[in-house]
Image (tube, rainbow, N blue to C red):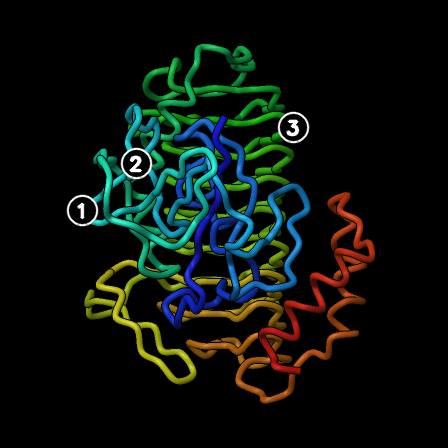
Amino acid sequence: MSSLYLLEPAEPGAAWAPFAGAAPLSELRAGMWRLRERWERGLGARAAGVIAPHATGHRLVNGPALIGTERIAGPAWVVDATFAAKLPMRAVGSAKRLVHGGKTVAWRLDAGQRWEGPFSHGDGVVIEGRPLVGAFDLITALEQLLFTDTLAALDGKTDPLPAGTTVLGNGEAIALRGAAVEPGVVFDARKGAIVLERGVQVRSGTRLEGPFWAGEGTFLVGGQFRHASVGPHCRVHGEVSTSVFNGYANKSHDGFVGHSVIGEWVNLGAGTITSNLKNTYGPIRLDLAEHRIETQRSNLGSLIGDHVKTAIGTLLPTGAVLGAGANLFGAPRAPKYVAPFAWGGDSTERIRVDQFIAMAKRIMPRRDVAVDANGEASLRAMHARLTGE
């Protein structure tokens, strides 16, 4: 069997804020699956390594190691980590390359062949998917891929719907895989399938509109959820629309989150609200510290990096970017850009690395993730990369 290696940009650029440098981009969720998982499923191969110089020192808990290109040898696939492959992927046969829109997005190495960089020779097979130019494109990927992701996940294996729930549309488009659902939950499958994985708990007063997916151990504790992908071990309440939760995040109270990407270990304080549409209905621009990014999107909420915390009543403007590790409080209306590890909103004060580690050691074990010596080293490396300290 071929190995799989994910190739990331050495310098992803401002368009990938706030996730570049915090962790490999291949761990971001596009639709129902992480970018890495999309390639693993499409090619039937397990990732053996990630080439992500921007995330040097990062350690995935249950994922491949970060490696240098000198370690790559065939038989193997080397794939563009910023391409969201559509699943199920067509059979690739003996193709040397996989192509989308005239651009090669994956390269096959034969046995004994070493990686010397992208090449344009050899037979190519055209595949479907979404090239991503920045973090905001994860919303476009969600819009384009979640419907087919959840539909493909309907394998006929499902627990029966509990008594007292309401189903709108086709009940066969709902898959429960060990989820606990209380009476009073509404499933609306008229626009897409709904898939709930093992250990998901759905409390009474929750309305789920497909396409929708919730990962293992996530709690949906009341509110309306539509066209959303909620990764494992989250706690989510309120109104969520067209948004991606990477995993291990808290939004346990009221507040609207729309067209947003929520990183891991985020905690959104009660009443945190995202704006996802300008009053002019015009295209949304990201205003970063030294860059302006034109997204060409009219709907875009917030891009919230890993380990971000927001205070009660925080109001996030359209196209807000919150850097990893930031602790946001102060004026209710947040600035459009918050620097990594900011202490407050537009303050120049930063969270020191020892403060960050102390918080992580209090928070992460609450989801049964221990911060061991390797985990602490990974967190310290992230702090150093993003703050330069």
Residue 133: give x, y in percent of width and height: 31, 59
Q: Nearer the viewer, mark 2 or mark 1?
A: 2
User: In the visual, does 8 lie left or right of 318?
Assistant: right
Residue 144: give x, y in percent of width and height: 28, 41
Q: Nearer the viewer, mark 3 or mark 2?
A: 2
For the point 63% across and 55% down, the residue is: 265
Residue type of the residue flagged with mark 2:
Lys
Q: Which residue has dot 1 on it?
A: 101
Residue type of the residue flagged with mark 1:
Gly
Classify mark 1: helix, strand or loop: loop
Classify mark 2: helix, strand or loop: loop
Residue 201: give x, y in percent of width and height: 62, 31
Q: Which residue has dot 3 on it?
A: 199
Residue 109 in sight in this render: yes
Counting residues from the N terminus, which is met first, the one under dot 3 or under dot 1?
Answer: 1
Residue 230: give x, y in percent of width and height: 51, 41
